[in-house]
Amino acid sequence: MSNIYDYIEWRGDLSICNDRFNEIDSLILSRLSYFPFDELIEENEEITIEESYKRYQERGTTGRILQQEDINLFPVLATSERFGKMKLTKYINKIDPIHEKQFSAITIIMPDDTIYVAYRGTDNTVIGWKEDFNMSFSELVPAQIDAVKYIENIASTYKSKIRIGGHSKGGNLAVYAAAFCKEEVQEKIINVYNNDGPGFCDKVVESEEYKNILNKVHTYIPQTSIIGRLLNHKEEITILKSTQTGIMQHDLYTWQVLGTKFVKDELTNSSEFIDKTITNWLKEVDPKQREKFIDTFFEILNTTEIETLSEFSSKKFTNALTMLNAYKNIDDESKEIMTKTLNVFFTIARSNIKINKPKINFRKQA
């Protein structure tokens, strides 16, 4: 089995001018949005991936490193003919606790006279995850507004045709930005790549803006996808193979490729079970109750004073006790909503387990 590292080793010596852009290139550039470019790229500057890596070696960075694989991939891209000379610009990284927003994006200028806008997915900040949860009750989250503004700014700065992509929440932002940007910007968009990103509420997927962009949207999810099956999707979806299981399949470094394509697969029973459980839960619990549940949960989480989920893991026992004490001190109405909401979820889950329970054949072996 091969992943994006093998792809770069195979195709890394060919510019996209000689071997055209494909879905694996999009996945790699989507991952590039997670790289720690803070203080490496100046505002309005255009520098190559090769130069950005040299700066990283010389200066280090204050940006968060989400996965070690990102740091391993950085020099591989920098030294390749295919990616090294691509130029980076318009890097932005904003975390706003007051408005519960985590937004980051970067633009890649490519040698075939096109540009690729990559939206970052959820990082490991508590604010980032809170914004993701807010999608379950809100028609619009702050990062989606910023995503539209970002693509319109890029389109006004560059005359080139545009590809847009992202992984996880970044995929959701890419689709939303393409759907709700100005018409003249939309006309410049070649394709939109959603790599295991969540869908949208009913109002968005039923809108004319969303429907008008569907023919350009390419969505990819692993066979046991969880994140990518949240909320509603109307576009065609490609199911691909991952070497991991469960939620760990969200890690795009585990996605399998063959040549310029993903290795195709089929959805597993566990993915169907999770999708059905969450979908039914959203139907049973009204948006106001979901909002109150999520706000209360993160209010309790915030008593630990952690800023990233990795910080929670470092003192898991202490933080758990802090959260338990905070739960005891919340008002009775909030406790009741927490209890009811969780009970609905687990009741639906138990029901779906019974429905999806495989039948066992007790025929004697010959």
Image (cartoon, rainbow, N blue to C red):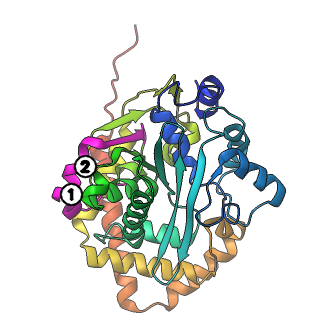
Horizontal and vertical percent position of residue 19: 51, 25
SS for tag 2? helix
Q: Amino acid at mark 2?
A: Ile
Which residue does the numbered mark 1 point to in the structure image?
Answer: 209
Residue that appears at 38% across and 56% down: 172
* Picture quadrant of residue 317: bottom right
Horizontal and vertical percent position of residue 151: 40, 60
Which residue does the numbered mark 2 point to in the structure image?
Answer: 213
Pointer 1 with pointer 2, Cβ within 8 A: yes
* Picture quadrant of residue 12: top right
Is residue 307 among what the camera can see?
yes
The residue carrying pointer 1 sits among few (fewer than 14), some (14 to 19) or many (20 or more) residues within 10 Å by Cα, namely some
Q: Quadrant of the C terminus?
A: top left
Is residue 199 among what the camera can see?
no
Residue that appears at 51% across and 57% down: 120
The residue nearer to you, when weighing 145 against 297, is 145
Horizontal and vertical percent position of residue 115: 47, 47
The residue nearer to you, when weighing 362 against 328, is 328
Q: Quadrant of the N terminus?
A: top right
User: Mark 1 to mark 2: distance in Å?
Assistant: 7 Å
Q: Amino acid at mark 1?
A: Glu
Q: Is residue 102 left or right of residue 354?
A: right
The residue nearer to you, when weighing 65 against 317, is 65
Number of dots carrying numbers? 2
Q: Which residues are magenta?
A: 198-224
